[in-house]
Image (cartoon, rainbow, N blue to C red):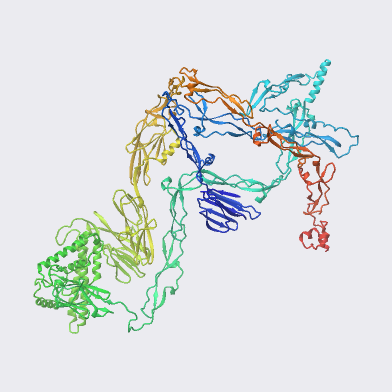
């Protein structure tokens, strides 16, 4: 087995199954050879080609991706007796291609000629030209058509200026190939060849033909010069079986029928008489005769004599003229003596046409067969007649002849009923006319003399194992390269009667095994989608998704797969994502991280929380502790040890310094001499107050502390003193002291900000232009304070986008603004405490420099946490513009309440400490009255008090109408107790295990007063005994459960509009996402905002914002994905918003928001679909496909926005295409004259093509297609104009001749529609106009050479000559051919030759030697084979190649012959006694020898091999043994007993008697 794989092949895969081994031979293009034994598995390089080889126990696999850089030959090294099979496939490169040649030489040197190109087959590997048949191997190799160009156009010097009409004349034929007739076939049967000569010829204007150089015809393939002929088998002699001997004793004769059978199985003539087997031979019957032996053999009697007579051969028509007689006519009379006639013809077989031609009688040689004879039709009416002696002799002779005229005869045998395994043949009995040898009606033969039915056995050889072949399966593919398979197995017929067949191993069938596989449907497939394998599910259980890629590919007819752009696939793209078919996840405990150890040293405990969760296959979670097995207590708590607690005499390791700062805001409201502060906060102070500022540190020396003010190093002076104990003292504050003071302790810093309060309660800034020594004037200070207030208002209400989002440029400016509003607040309680008033008056008198008109209504220093102001600033940044001023007022009131309350608590503790000398009743009463009064004032400071809906209490004016707005509060949820939570909107409520109530506040303003409603997760809240709506529109949830988790939205609405704000209620654990399930369609707006979970359909170039509102404890981190791919931070906006600007088709997809914290994660997705309004396309693919299937009869037109017009004939069909596109695909509606279609029509290609079956139904009007999708609509129009087709004969065809008297021009017939030419098939129904030819080019032709045909060759072989006549003539305008002088033609062209050689082949004949000895193998009784040599030689006796005699009939080289050596037969003896009397094991044998008939002595068995060898062994006595008595059933039982075999079961039963005695 050898597999040759040529250079450049690719994708080779070869697999060997069986015990043998592969090895590899290579040969480069430079001829370098090498071998590789492929002994082990691995990858390696052979001739720079990468090879992968696998060696397995039962097979070897070879893979080469290619392309190969050398010729590879893969061979098999045989290693065992068992057969191996090889399967291989590879793609072979095209290594031969057509290459266009240069132009051949010009056909004329002057006066104008032409040049042609041809094409030659070029080997790309060796870069050389090869024979054309190499390029014909590849169907895709199309031979280039030749090119023709004019050349040498200059006039010839000796010419008279008249240019000869050259062969490239437009109306003159090009040179062409001409062939002679085929020669006679070299053999009348058995396969011969015939040849012809092919030459390139040129025809001149008079039709004269002359040979030219072959290159002029190379633009077309040269015709073959040799072809096979008479490839059928020659007739053969067929000898039938011998008859029985004619005697029953002694010597007699036997006969047989010999027929001449042709290749069709018909009885015919044409067999060689010399090789005909004999029909009669002597035979000897071994029984002795008891009468004198006859001298001559007894002749056979009927019917064998009649059968043995040779059948008259029907004369066959041959290539030599011969007489062919037809059948005899019927007898001329119905009774008595008459005559018969027949027709005899002289006929010949024409070999080149394989037809029979009749010739005159005198053309046939030899005696003509008789055409008349006498016949006798029986006695007339049965009457006796008197005859004269002459008549009597004639009659008796006729009667005797009649008696012998019709008789029964065996005429061969039927075919064998079986081809093997034993069949029968039946002798065919017919009634024959012995004169004509024709079959006649059986009634003419005597029925009583009909011979008996004769049967003989045939095909006795046992049937060999043979291949049983099933039907081909259906093709595995409908296109590309599919495969068909079939079952092929080796079977053996055991019994023809029982039709019993067994299946054998393939090795037992000797013929090659038929193919199991074949290629089918080898043509290109249309492009289609090819999915990749589904990826693994995103989750192993519960709800997950799988993805796959979808590629547009095309299966080509060579088996390769071509990847194409997605636009090539016309069918919709299959789904690329699906939900996995997972089961529910098993329940599992989710454990939190361990808490910190409960102690900082020594032994303590750690704990963690556990939640039992089960994920369903729908993606939902079930949280239920009963679903999980109980957790041991030890899994939720564990001990921890942090080392022994010891007193720290000295730090074990050095720690960094630490400043103990206090983050508070101080507001001085009355004069004090000195105030003490700690770094870390803000202080708003009155001028001329002295300040001590301390910087307490740990792990740092106080003497090493440094101070800075506004980033400049402070140095002790008379005004500011820096002590060595980390303290600075500022004497009597002045405006230049405001700023930021920084305390630095090594690597750490803390700040303290000091600002001054002006006389009008506005915070002053440090003027840049005033020196420290200058005293600030009041007007400039007040002006600065007013400027600052305006700046803060501008930031708060008209700030930049960054400031509005809560990113503060300078937080101290916000602090200034809030403190200013706080100290200007007029709702403080009156001064009712005497001690405070006395202190205030004392300080007022002491401070003469202060503004005497100022009233101090707050006799204390206010202190609040810095974080409280940060919360107020965050709240303000979230409020709508129209509410900020009002909301500021409300927050200031709340702040004042908190500051005053904390001050009262501090005062109460001071009073308790000094109550020994005071009356507690007189002290506590005023305090409580103060608180009571202040609290009541706060109660009226609600939203309604500050924002009246109709009347402003300050100005007394009616407020304008206003749409609703909900107040947003960012303060944390108030835990009033362990079981009750109260919160405002905008926060997250985390449910704990002990929470019994949750109260959600919602305050809204608007005019008219808004109506409040609540929704949970987008659905209206259903109130019940657990979900309560309070009178102030708050929502209270009693005994909250896990099902209450979600986003609660407060919706406020009135006639002018609505507002909505959400709050999240969640468990401590996995985060929540506020999702929507709405579908939003945007076809106009430039921007659209949706909640995550929605489906968004929008036009292109819009800005899409997707909101992902998240709640969770711990706080969740938000990540965005597009089609499962994480998006970069460039796409993100703040607060879970994703902005997709300027949307295009590439932005389509699934956008997912994932919120994740330590407890878990959750994802919601929104599908973004980009809408594209319908738009026109320049073409429509489907229309081209429909037109190609409809043929040329259909007219087509595409619609357009302005309207397309098409002219068409009445009664015909029209196709109107609506070429539009859009996303999603538009729906198309067809209209006629603006109304729905009512005429006969069909819609094709999903409605994009309208077929009008008869345009006459629509005489006028306009067709329009309305394309519409969610993004818009488009109308396209087309109109049909109906006109008749008509014939036109205005143009003339080219002249039929360039000179002479026969040139004519015919009008050119065209079919027109609306003046434009169309296919003539449209006018076939119209009557054609009469066409009159017009004479043209009627002029004398130039002189030309004229030649006659060649004469027959003077000799049939050995070289002869042929001649012809050459004359110069000119064709005149009258059609006469006028002889001219040779000089007239010689000026134009060279004189053609008039003599040529012919039949140069030598004269040859077949010569045979004498026959050899008759000693070949025996083929019958006394019949062998002898041989002789046959060779071809010339008449001179010189031996030549047999090919030269191939046209002559070849004599036979073998024939049958008679020899006494083959007078042998099989001799058998009698059967031996059976070895058993019963049972299944009895057998008997006999002797079989091959012996000579005459001597009766044994000879070698191969002499008898022409007959089947009789069996020498058989089973016997196969009957069941009776069990009545125990007896032996074989004669070998004594031997069994001697060998002690009685214990074996098979001998114990058969030798029961003998073994029983033993």
Percent x, y of residue 406: 77, 26
Q: Looking at the picture, tell me which residue is in the foreground, 278 or 808.
A: 278
Q: Looking at the picture, tell me which residue is in the foreground, 1460 or 371.
A: 1460
Q: In percent of the image, x 38 and y 79: which residue is there?
A: 642
Quadrant of the rendered structure where residue 539 is? bottom left
Quadrant of the rendered structure where residue 953 is? bottom left
Percent x, y of residue 708: 21, 73
From the viewer's perspective, is residue 529 above or below residue 1460? below
Percent x, y of residue 697: 26, 78
From the viewer's perspective, is residue 442 above or below residue 846? above
Describe residue 1051's horizontal placement relative to residue 1349 as left or right. left
From the viewer's perspective, is residue 470 above or below residue 937? above
Describe residue 493's horizontal placement relative to residue 940 as left or right. right
Q: In percent of the image, x 25 and y 74: which residue is there?
A: 749
Which quarter of the figure is the C terminus placed in? bottom right
Quadrant of the rendered structure where residue 1105 is? bottom left
Asked if residue 939 can be seen in this view, the reply is no
Percent x, y of residue 779: 10, 67
């Amino acid at each position: 087995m050898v597999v040759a794989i040529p250079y450049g092949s690719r994708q080779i895969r070869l697999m060997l199954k069986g015990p043998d081994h592969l090895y590899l031979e290579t040969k480069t293009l430079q001829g370098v050879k090498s071998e590789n034994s492929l002994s082990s598995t691995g990858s390696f390089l052979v001739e720079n080609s990468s090879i992968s080889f696998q060696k397995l126990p039962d097979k070897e696999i070879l893979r080469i991706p290619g392309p190969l850089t050398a010729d590879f030959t893969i061979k098999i090294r045989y290693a065992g007796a068992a057969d191996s099979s090889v399967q291989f496939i590879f793609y072979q490169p095209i290594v031969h291609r057509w290459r266009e040649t240069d132009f051949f030489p010009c056909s004329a040197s002057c006066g104008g000629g032409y040049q042609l190109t041809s094409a030659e087959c070029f080997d790309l590997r060796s870069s050389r030209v090869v024979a054309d048949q190499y390029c014909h191997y590849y169907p895709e190799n199309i031979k280039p058509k030749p090119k023709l160009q004019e050349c040498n156009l200059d006039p010839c010097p000796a010419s008279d200026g008249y240019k000869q009409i050259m062969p490239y004349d437009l109306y003159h034929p090009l040179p062409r190939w001409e062939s002679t007739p085929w020669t006679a076939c070299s053999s009348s049967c058995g396969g011969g060849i015939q040849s012809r000569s092919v030459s390139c010829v040129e025809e001149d204007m008079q039709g004269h033909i002359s040979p030219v150089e072959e290159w002029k015809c190379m633009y077309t393939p040269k015709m073959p010069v040799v072809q096979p002929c008479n490839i059928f088998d020659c007739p053969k002699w067929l000898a039938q079986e011998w008859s029985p001997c004619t005697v029953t004793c002694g010597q007699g004769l036997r006969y047989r029928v010999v027929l001449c059978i042709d290749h069709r199985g018909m009885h015919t003539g044409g067999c060689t008489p010399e090789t005909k087997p004999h029909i009669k031979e002597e035979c000897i019957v071994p029984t002795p005769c008891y009468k004198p032996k006859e001298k001559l053999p007894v002749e056979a009697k009927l019917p064998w004599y009649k059968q043995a007579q040779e059948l008259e051969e029907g004369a066959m028509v041959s290539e030599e003229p011969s007489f062919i007689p037809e059948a005899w006519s019927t007898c001329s009379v119905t009774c008595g003596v008459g005559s018969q006639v027949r027709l005899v013809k002289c006929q010949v077989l024409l070999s080149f046409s394989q037809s029979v031609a009749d010739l005159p009688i005198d053309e046939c040689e030899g005696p003509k067969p008789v055409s008349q004879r006498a016949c006798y039709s029986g006695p007339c009416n049965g009457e006796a007649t008197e005859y004269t002696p002459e008549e009597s002799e004639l009659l008796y002779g006729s009667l005797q002849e009649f008696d012998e005229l019709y008789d029964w005869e065996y005429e061969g045998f039927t075919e064998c009923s079986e081809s093997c395994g034993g069949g029968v043949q039946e002798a065919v009995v017919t009634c024959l006319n012995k004169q004509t040898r024709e079959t006649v009606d059986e009634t003419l033969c005597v029925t009583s003399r009909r011979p008996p039915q004769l049967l003989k056995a045939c095909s006795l050889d046992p049937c060999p194992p043979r291949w049983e072949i099933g039907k081909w399966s259906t093709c595995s593919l409908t296109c590309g390269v599919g495969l068909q398979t079939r079952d092929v197995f080796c079977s053996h017929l055991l019994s023809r009667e029982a039709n019993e067949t067994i299946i054998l191993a393939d090795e037992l069938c000797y013929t090659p095994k038929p193919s199991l596989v074949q290629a089918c449907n080898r043509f290109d497939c249309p492009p289609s989608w090819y999915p990749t394998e589904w990826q693994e599910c995103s989750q192993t259980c519960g709800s997950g998704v799988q993805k796959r890629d979808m590629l547009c590919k095309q299966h080509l007819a060579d088996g390769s797969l071509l990847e194409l752009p997605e636009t090539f696939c016309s069918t919709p793209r299959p789904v690329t994502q699906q939900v996995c078919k997972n089961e529910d996840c098993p329940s599992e405990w989710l454990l939190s991280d361990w808490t910190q150890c409960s102690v900082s040293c020594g032994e303590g405990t750690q704990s963690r929380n556990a939640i039992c969760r089960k994920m369903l296959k729908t993606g939902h979670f079930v949280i239920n502790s009963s679903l999980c097995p109980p957790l041991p207590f030890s899994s939720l708590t564990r001990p921890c040890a942090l080392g022994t607690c010891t007193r720290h005499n000295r730090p074990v390791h050095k720690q960094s310094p630490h400043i103990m700062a206090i983050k508070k805001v101080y507001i001085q409201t009355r004069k004090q001499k000195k105030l003490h502060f700690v770094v870390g906060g803000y202080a708003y102070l009155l001028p001329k107050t002295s300040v001590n500022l301390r910087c307490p540190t740990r792990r740092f020396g106080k003497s090493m502390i440094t101070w800075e003010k506004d980033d400049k190093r402070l140095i002790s002076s008379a005004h500011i003193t820096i002590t060595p104990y980390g303290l600075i003292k500022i004497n009597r504050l002045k405006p230049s002291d405001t700023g930021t003071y920084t305390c630095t302790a090594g690597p750490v810093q803390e700040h303290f900000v000091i600002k001054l309060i002006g006389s009008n309660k506005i915070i002053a800034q440090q003027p840049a232009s005033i020196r420290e020594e200058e005293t600030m004037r009041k007007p400039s200070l007040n002006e600065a304070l007013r400027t600052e207030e305006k700046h803060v208002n501008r930031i708060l209400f008209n700030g930049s986008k960054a400031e509005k989002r809560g990113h503060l440029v300078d937080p101290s400016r916000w602090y200034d603004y809030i403190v200013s509003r706080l100290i200007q607040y007029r709702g403080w309680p009156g001064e009712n405490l005497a001690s405070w008033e006395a202190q205030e008056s004392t300080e007022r008198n002491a401070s003469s420099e202060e503004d005497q008109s100022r009233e101090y209504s707050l006799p204390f220093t206010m202190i609040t946490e810095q974080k409280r102001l940060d919360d107020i600033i965050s709240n303000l940044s979230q409020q709508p513009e129209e509410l900020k001023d009002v909301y500021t007022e409300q927050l200031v009131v709340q702040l004042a309440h908190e500051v005053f309350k904390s001050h009262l608590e501090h005062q109460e503790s001071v009073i308790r400490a000094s109550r020994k000398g005071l009356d507690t009743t007189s002290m506590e009463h005023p305090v409580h009255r103060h608180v009571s009064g202040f609290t009541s004032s706060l109660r009226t400071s609600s939203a309604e008090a500050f924002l009246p809906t109709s009347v402003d209490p300050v100005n007394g004016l009616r407020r304008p109408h206003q749409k609703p707005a909900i107040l947003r509060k960012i303060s944390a949820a108030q835990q009033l107790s362990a079981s009750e939570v109260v919160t405002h909107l905008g926060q997250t409520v985390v449910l704990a295990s002990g929470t019994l109530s949750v109260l959600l506040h919602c305050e809204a303003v608007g005019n008219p007063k808004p109506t409040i409603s609540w929704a949970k997760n987008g659905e209206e809240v259903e109130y019940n005994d657990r979900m309560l709506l309070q009178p102030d529109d708050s929502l209270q949830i009693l005994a909250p459960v896990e099902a209450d988790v979600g986003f609660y939205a407060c919706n406020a609405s009135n006639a002018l509009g609505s507002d909505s704000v959400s709050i999240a209620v969640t468990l401590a654990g996995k985060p929540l996402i506020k999702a929507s399930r709405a579908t939003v369609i945007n076809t106009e707006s430039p921007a659209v905002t949706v909640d995550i979970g929605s489906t968004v359909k929008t036009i292109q170039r819009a800005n899409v914002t997707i909101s992902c509102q998240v709640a969770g404890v711990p706080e969740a981190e938000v990540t965005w994905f597009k089609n499962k791919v994480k998006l970069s931070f460039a796409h993100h906006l703040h607060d879970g918003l994703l902005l997709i600007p300027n949307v295009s088709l590439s932005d389509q997809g699934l956008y997912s928001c994932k919120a994740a914290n330590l407890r878990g994660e959750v994802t919601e997705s929104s599908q973004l679909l980009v809408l594209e309004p319908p738009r026109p396309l320049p073409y429509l693919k489907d229309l081209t496909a429909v037109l190609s299937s409809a043929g040329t009869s259909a007219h087509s037109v595409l619609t357009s926005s302005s309207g397309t017009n098409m002219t068409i004939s009445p009664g015909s069909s029209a196709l109107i295409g609506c070429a539009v596109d859009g996303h999603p695909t538009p729906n198309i509606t067809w209209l006629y004259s603006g109304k729905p279609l009512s005429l006969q029509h069909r819609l094709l290609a999903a409605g994009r093509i309208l077929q009008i079956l008869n345009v006459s139904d629509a005489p006028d009007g306009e067709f329009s297609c309305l394309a519409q999708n969610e993004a818009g609509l488009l109308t396209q129009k087309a109109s049909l104009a109906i006109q008749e087709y008509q014939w036109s004969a205005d143009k003339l065809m080219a002249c039929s001749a360039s000179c002479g008297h026969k040139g004519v021009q015919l009008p050119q017939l065209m079919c027109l529609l609306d003046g434009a030419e169309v296919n003539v098939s449209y006018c076939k129904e119209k009557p054609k106009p009469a066409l009159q030819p017009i004479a043209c080019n009627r002029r004398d032709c130039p002189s030309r050479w004229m030649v006659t045909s060649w004469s027959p060759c003077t000799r049939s072989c050995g070289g002869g000559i042929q001649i012809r006549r050459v004359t110069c003539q000119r064709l005149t305008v009258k059609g006469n051919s006028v002889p001219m002088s040779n000089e007239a033609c010689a000026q134009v062209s060279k004189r053609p030759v008039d003599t040529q050689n012919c039949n140069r082949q030598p004269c040859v004949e077949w010569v045979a030697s004498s026959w050899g000895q008759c000693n070949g193998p025996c083929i019958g009784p006394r019949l062998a084979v002898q041989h002789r040599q046959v060779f071809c030689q010339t008449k001179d006796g010189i031996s030549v190649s047999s090919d030269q005699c191939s046209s002559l009939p070849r004599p036979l080289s073998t024939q049958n012959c008679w020899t006494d050596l083959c007078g042998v037969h099989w001799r058998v003896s009698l059967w031996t006694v059976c070895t058993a009397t019963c049972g299944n094991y009895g057998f008997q044998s006999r002797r079989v020898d091959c012996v000579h008939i005459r001597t009766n002595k044994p000879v070698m068995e191969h002499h008898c091999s022409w007959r089947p060898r009789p069996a020498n062994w058989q089973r016997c006595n196969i009957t069941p043994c009776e069990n009545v008595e125990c007896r032996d059933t074989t004669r070998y039982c004594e031997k069994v007993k001697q060998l002690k075999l009685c214990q074996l079961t098979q001998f114990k039963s058969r030798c029961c008697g003998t073994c029983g005695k033993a």
